[in-house]
Image (spheres, rainbow, N blue to C red):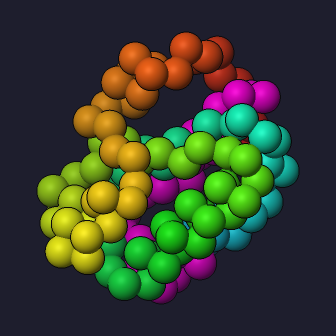
Amino acid sequence: MTITSNCQVVLFKPEGRIDLQGGIALSEKMSAIVPQPNQLWVLDLAKVDFMDSSGLVSLVKSLKLARQSGCRFVLCNVQDPVRLVLELTQLDSVFEMFHTYEDIFTVVQEKSLVTVA
């Protein structure tokens, strides 16, 4: 997983499956970020081809953590199998979703990113 961060944007790019194991790994990575108020957390799902209920739990936890910290949490590049799961569980109305990463910046102006380990 790649994490890209600056004082405004934190970009998470998981790959493969977000199931029990992948969900735990994602939650751990997101918990390791020190949230700052008004940060934008972006979960780029371009390389995620599967998500189950355990993965949904990690997404909801991440959304909750971001909101409690005064951050905004959005999804982008949501692939059809994952979008279907979000729609079936009606979580598509809970998460802000954008077609592409670039689309986010029609709303948010800050785009200067630095990759961190």
Q: Is residue 31 magenta?
A: no
Task: Please indicate whether residue 28 sits to the left or right of residue 79 in the image.
Answer: right
Residue 91 at x, y = what percent?
A: 32, 67
Across and down, in percent, residue 18 comes to: 41, 71
Q: Residue at x 79, y 60 (%)?
A: 32
Is residue 22 or residue 84 the one in the foreground?
Answer: 84
Is residue 82 something one can see in this rendering? no
Which residue: 68% across, 63% down? Answer: 65
Q: Which part of the image, by quadrant, shows the C terminus?
A: top right
Viewer-proximal residue among 111 and 74: 74
Rendered view: 42 above or below 9: below
Give coordinates of residue 22: x percent, y percent. 50, 74
Residue 18 relative to residue 64: left or right: left
Image coordinates of residue 93 in percent, x first then y, are 30, 58
Measuring 26% from the left and 36% from the top, which residue is drawn there? Answer: 99
**In the displayed structure image, the side of residue 110 where residue 106 appears, left or right:** left
Check if residue 6 falls in the magenta segment: yes
Please give the range of residues in magenta. Answer: 1-24
* Residue 103 relative to residue 81: left or right: right
Residue 37: image quadrant is top right
Residue displayed at 61% across by 16% down? 110
Query: Is residue 14 or residue 72 the one in the foreground?
Result: 72
Displayed quadrant of residue 55: bottom left
In the image, 70 versus 116, the foreground residue is 70
